[in-house]
Image (spheres, grey):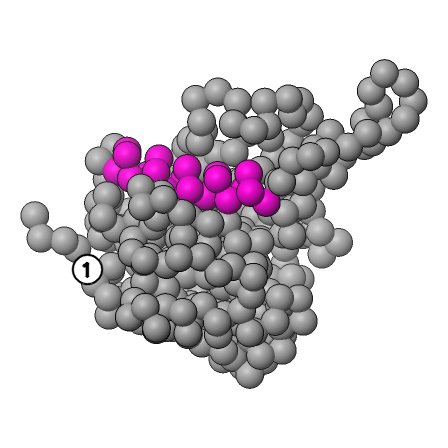
Amino acid sequence: MDFVFCRRALLPFATLLIAASAQQLAPPAREIALYPGAAPGSEEWNWTETQTATANGMPMVQNVVHPVLQFYPADKNVAVGTAMIVAPGGGFRNLMMSYEGVDIARRLNAVGIDAFVLKYRLTYTGPKVTSGGSTPTDPQRGQNVRELAGADGQQAVRLVRQHAAEYGVRPDRIGMIGYSAGGAVLLSAVTGPPASRPNFAAPIYAAGADTAKPSIDGAPPLFIAVSSDDQAVGWQGSVDLYTAWRKANIPVELHVFQMGQHGFVKTGGGADHYLDRLEEWLRVNGWLSKPAP
């Protein structure tokens, strides 16, 4: 049975913006802590994670202290033994949990991929904290939250790979897709230590692509998508990623859509169908085929 893997199957993005106020996110089958105790580097964080929404009613998470993976398994009748970690965006202050998170997980499920939505650590946006008096202090002063979030991305890959048999996936078929800030988290994993690198990855309008100049020896194949009118991160970083991968002779595919803006919120062009292109890429590279027993 074939499944259509496209944004239209999700509902057009504009419709999502209108309908989101009534949207209830599908609950995960289970939630998996990334670390056995406090996450390294944030042991002193003691605030509470916040569930909120955008002005349009889109579900968001803020103030993540304890990073987790939310597991959305594919139906066993269609599962292909491939997993993908989904890293939502939100400027390292929010996590857009619907159209860059759970909605993507459910579409991956439709083509047989087991999905893990990553809630990585974020910049604190709660009330001002006072310490030893009335002067507000920054509870994350001296810490690089982006690096901590990147470490969460690396740990997510390690964790899924280590427990691949438990989740019913292959340890050599662990992928990752990341949006905006989640794309930066993805790039930390892609260019990190070999044990924390996914086997393939899809940075979508990824933040940080224009500044990352890592060694990519042994890096995985990439599917890259961005719009030429992206007003937040631009398109040049995605082109630079593509060029670096081509020069290193690593498989890579790039789509620069004429319009879409950041978040692919401007509809009516090719960016509306980027998930179709992703499915084609996954299929041609064998990640949607069931491995031989």
Query: In the rendered image of this protein, does residue 122 appear above or below residue 176?
Result: above
In the image, taking residue 219 as reference, residue 56 lies left or right, namely right
Magenta stretch: includes residue 153 = yes
Q: Main secondary structure of the magenta part?
A: helix
- Residue at the extreme top of the image, as rendered: 132
- Dot 1 amino acid type: Ser
Query: In the rendered image of this protein, does residue 37 appear above or below residue 226?
Result: above
Secondary structure beneath disc 1? loop
In the picture, residue 169 is in which quadrant? top left
Magenta residues (range): 146-164
Q: Answer few, some or many: residues within 10 Å of disc 1's Cα (few below 14, many 20 plus, some between 14 and 19).
A: some
Residue 287 or residue 74, whichever sits in front: 287
- x, y percentage for residue 62? 66, 40
- Residue at the extreme right of the image, as rendered: 134
Magenta stretch: includes residue 157 = yes
Q: Quadrant of the N terminus?
A: bottom left
Residue 102 makes an appearance in the image: no
Question: Pointer 1: what residue?
Answer: 289
In the picture, residue 287 is in which quadrant? bottom left
- x, y percentage for residue 86? 45, 50
In the image, taking residue 258 as reference, residue 253 lies left or right, namely left
Residue 230 or residue 283, whichever sits in front: 230
Query: In the rendered image of this protein, does residue 68 appear above or below residue 285?
Result: above
Residue 240 makes an appearance in the image: yes
- x, y percentage for residue 110? 34, 56
- x, y percentage for residue 68? 48, 34
Q: Residue at x 48, y 39 (%)?
A: 152
Q: Residue at x 63, y 78 (%)?
A: 229
